[in-house]
Image (cartoon, rainbow, N blue to C red):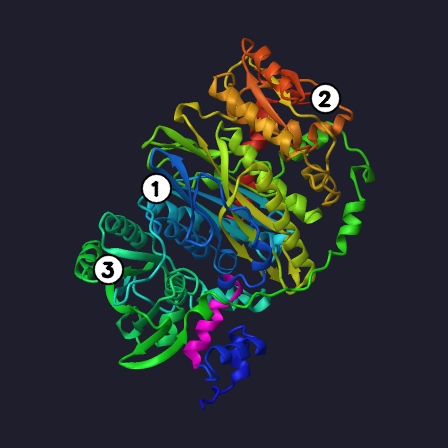
Amino acid sequence: MSQPIEDLDEVLKNHKLTKAEYEDILRILEGRHPNLVEIGIFSAMWSEHCSYKSSTKYLRGFPTEAPWVIQGPGENAGVIDIGDGMAAVFKMESHNHPSFIEPFQGAATGVGGILRDIFTMGARPIANLNALRFGTVEGDSSTAKYQRHLVRGVVDGIGSYGNCMGVPTIGGEMSFDESYNGNILVNAFSLGLVKSDEIFLGVASGLGNPVMYVGSKTGRDGLGGAVMSSDSFTEESKSLRPTVQVGDPFTEKLLLEACLELFKTDLIVGIQDMGAAGLTSSAFEMAGKTGAGLIMHLDKVPAREEGMTPYDFMLSESQERMLICAKQGSEQAIIDIFERWGLDVAVIGEVTDTARMELMWHGEKCADMPIAPVSEEAPVLDRPIARPKYLDEVNSKSIDNYESIPNQEAFEILLSNIEISDKAWVYNQYDSMVQTNTTKAPGSLDASCVRIKENGKALAMSTDCNPRYCYINPHKGAALAVVESGRNVAMSGARPLSITDCLNFGNPENPEVMWQFAQSCEGIKEACLALNTPVVSGNVSLYNETNGVSVYPTPAIAMVGLNEDENKILPSVFQEEGSQILLIGEDKGDFAGSLYVKALYGETIGDLPSFDYQAELDLWELVIEANKEGLLHSAKDVNVGGVAIALSKMAAVSGKGVMASFDLRNSKNIFDETQSRALLEVSSKNLIEVVHRAASMGLHVVNIGNVGGDIVRINDVQLPLDVLKELYFNTFSKIIERDL
């Protein structure tokens, strides 16, 4: 009978394993005590980051099927059919914990990781987005100064990696709230194109087939990263910098091209990115999907450092690496491809029929464990849930609890708010035009778009989540994240098809956080079913907590839609002087979770009203079909800051003034955030036709004004266009660069 390793309690604590989980490990190993390598493997594979053990219960039941879905959750990325033998491959993932510890490398390697998820499937990445959440950045406090440092570092990291890879970053979103002071959120999205019959999966099968390692050498960087990302932060967390990976985008560019060359051959069975938990997760996942066994010789893995151990090789998260299951006899051809691109390549093992992972070190076995219980049977936790106590107070308040502020004053405060202001300081650091397919670039409002040269169509994509909505009502807030990302896509003339998600929450050991998570999942399920936009991929990031304070529930959604004609991409800013402006949708005076209340009174309060999915679908249908027939000049959804801010953004970006006037129940409702509304710019010639179509669909429609002049006037508020543009375009850089 084997003996437990020394200082077992301390080892388990360092590996975030419980005594109950250790007992489960003993059962799996049939009574044998694991060695340190095996404990490290169990720790990584059963970490929250890799196993989803707290979230699996609630992710079940997500709608994942539709006629256009080729590959749903469970692979490196989701895949949808976009016609003419082409498919779009996309996913969103988090790199939150690493980016707080080391913002440049954390964000950069987040981009690198999501790109590998895409090209591992056989697709060439053609577009990146990001969804970023930061804490308080205004003022002279140490927190604000550090948050500004994080903004600068994260943006630099994203731009550095994406630009070097030659993949355009075409859009994204950014918001700020004190709930992110201790944990910023960095969510990276990528989309690629592939022929629908040339998709590769992460599987290992075929007795005797060689297992090959390709890419960069393995070092000790990122060691234990998956486990680190499965725990909360404290003041000592900056000592975790060694667990943050170090990226090399130039090597990844070579790896991308080498893999795409490989995919043109018939040399491999499957391929898997070495992401979180490195060689451990890639090997166990590839074999676990097929029931195969693997034997791997760790001393054959290319090493970057001296004195590395089997533990180091299995748990390192060094970047730019792949694991390949090749066909027997193809080894030299594969070696030739990767050596031609200047990359490391080695045969490190083979597929067996034992259903076990056997790890060798200079001829001696250093680990031997069954694969299925590790990769496919991680613990599924049923954590306690409890409705948060804070909800009674915040839900009981409304805008009527506050003294009224003159609309003109409110207008200027909102236009100066960092959440509203243009983020050119950010997106000008990203190459958005490389590959020459970007047709709706950052700063153009609402969705971003790329053309598909292969079939003359276009893809629209948008990330969205309003954390304030999710804080006051996680169910409806998460549903609205799906709705709003879809509305952005529809406003570009594309039909929303599918989503990927990145579910960012606090500590799952807190019953109130798990309640938020459970409610948010139900909201996503509800919205995706109602809108027929299934979930095809996603990611869960928990333990976004520092010193007991969790972030707001932040289920970020990225929606992808298809426009049948690349020449029919609908702008979201004014196009012609003299055009008429239609407001679609009825004002209901909704200020729950609004920026208006947050910016003017410093609070996030209220409760979200019931939502009409059919009205939302009718709005999408109106815009999509009217755009096909050339009846619209532009379309913009009404969202944060209401009609006043939506019109102001359209005016600022287009450089055209606007005169708008319309009746409201309350004058401040020019700032309300009632859902299912949009602003449509139409010519006088098409005005009657569009109004008739909207009315025939049961949509509320009113002509509120026209485009033109050098003033922006909306009911009782106004600003000269040049003053408005100064506020909109220059506020952000003044805040973020104040320390430089």
Pick the front one: 494 or 441: 494
In this picture, which residue range is highlighted in magenta?
Answer: 35-49
Residue 298 in the figure: left or right of residue 620: left
Q: Is residue 307 above or below residue 67?
A: below
Q: Is residue 655 above or below residue 304?
A: above
Other residues around mark 2 within 10 Å, as few (<14) / some (14–19) / many (≥20): few
The first of marks 1 and 3 along the sequence is 1
Residue identifier under label 1: 196
Tell me which residue sits at (55%, 16%) in the image: 682
Pick the front one: 293 or 423: 293
Pick the front one: 279 or 14: 279
Front: mark 2 or 1 = 1
* Residue 54 spot, x, y in % from top left: 58, 62
The tag on residue 327 is 3
The tag on residue 716 is 2
Q: Badges 1 and 3: C-beta atoms under 8 Å apart?
A: no
The first of marks 2 and 3 along the sequence is 3
Instruction: Give the main secondary structure, helix, strand or loop, of the magenta stretch.
Output: helix
The Cα–Cα distance between marks 2 and 1, rounded to whole angstroms, is 54 Å
